Image: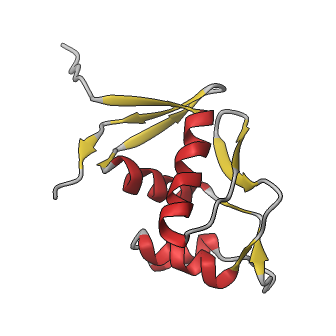
Amino acid sequence: MRDISEKRTVELRWSEVGGIVSEEIKEVLGLQVPCKVNVIDGSFWDVTFINCRLPLPKLCQLLQATQATPEDWEDALPDEGGVDVGGIGIVLAEKLISRHLKLTWEHHLITTDSLWLVGVADIPC
């Protein structure tokens, strides 16, 4: 017999994802940064800042606010020693979403119109 289990899921439309990231940037940095989500082949997504670049010290503040791991820092910082960034990757963006929603999840599913969070649990207070 097959083992079937139910998991709590949350669907976020991509426009919601961009809005959440923008709200968290405003909360942490006090800056209004409009964000656009870019979905690539249903297997990857990232966030581009619209008409804005964040200086590295501001990016570091976001990483600190999300309690990023050393690997997360390595993923988020530019490779070529740039002084600012025009967007953030999936790892930091998901940490900002988790912080905003006060949720964690086991997996994510990327579709053309939504981000699905699977195995969702509340973050203990």
Which residue is nearer to you in this view: 48 or 79?
48
Instruction: Indicate the position of residue 34 as horizontal and vertical percent values.
Output: 69, 52
Q: Is residue 71 above or below residue 96?
A: below
Q: Is residue 111 left or right of residue 24?
A: right
* Residue 68 visible in the picture: no
Q: Is residue 115 above or below residue 122?
A: above
In the picture as drawn, the residue positioned furthest to the top comes out as 1
The structure residue drawn at horizontal position 31% and vertical position 51%, both measured from the top left corner, is 102
* Residue 84 visible in the picture: yes
Q: Is residue 37 left or right of residue 100?
A: right
Q: Is residue 48 left or right of residue 22?
A: right
Instruction: Indicate the position of residue 29 as horizontal and vertical percent values.
Output: 55, 71
Question: In the picture, which quadrant includes the N terminus?
Answer: top left
Which residue is nearer to you in this view: 48 or 120?
48
Instruction: Indicate the position of residue 45 as horizontal and vertical percent values.
Output: 66, 45
Q: Quadrant of residue 39?
A: top right
The structure residue drawn at horizontal position 62% and vertical position 71%, both measured from the top left corner, is 76
The structure residue drawn at horizontal position 48% and vertical position 80%, both measured from the top left corner, is 70
